[in-house]
Image: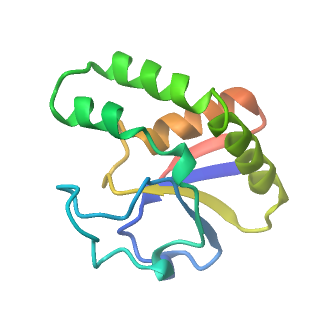
Amino acid sequence: MTLFTQSIYVPSSADPDALRISVMCRHTLSNGWGIDPKITSASYDVWVPDLAPPDQLIGAWYRGELSREAFKAGYFAHIDQAPQRQTLDLLLELIFATHRKPTLLCVEPKGEFCHRQLLAQRCQQLEPRLTVVHL
């Protein structure tokens, strides 16, 4: 089974077989103020805000207060505790139950270092049968 990651800004029409899963806490502009008009309910099929980084962690990252390793450790600590861990287990069940291409979404354009990439990595650690492809 393959788990994909992609920017939520890639139109859903780009791959109609994708099961688009937003893992963002909210769909705001990059400055955090106000709803991003480019992200609508048509941008994703499922929204799982529990698996987004907590505001304090993401704020520290954008202010340059954390290294990549510190962000990664903080994010993994967040998703490995209840209730996020139960949500993560449900996400893994959904990934294997769907007949569509499960695709994790957030705003980062490339996903070279973002929480969707880290989430995919944790999913693969928990379920080694997964292959991860970053689109």
- The colour scheme applied to this rendered structure is rainbow
Q: Residue at x 41, y 79 (%)?
A: 40
**Residue 21 occupies which quadrant of the picture?**
bottom right
**Residue 114 occupies which quadrant of the picture?**
top left
Toward the right, the furthest residue is 97
**Residue 9 occupies which quadrant of the picture?**
bottom left
As drawn, is 91 to the left or to the right of 73? right
Q: Residue at x 32, y 52 (%)?
A: 108
Q: Residue at x 55, y 75 (%)?
A: 15
Q: Report x, y in % for residue 62.
A: 20, 36
Q: Is residue 16 visible?
A: yes
Q: Report x, y in % for residue 60.
A: 24, 29
Q: Is residue 1 visible?
A: no
Q: Report x, y in % for residue 35.
A: 28, 71
Q: Report x, y in % for residue 64.
A: 16, 27
Q: With respect to residue 31, does 55 lie above or below? A: above
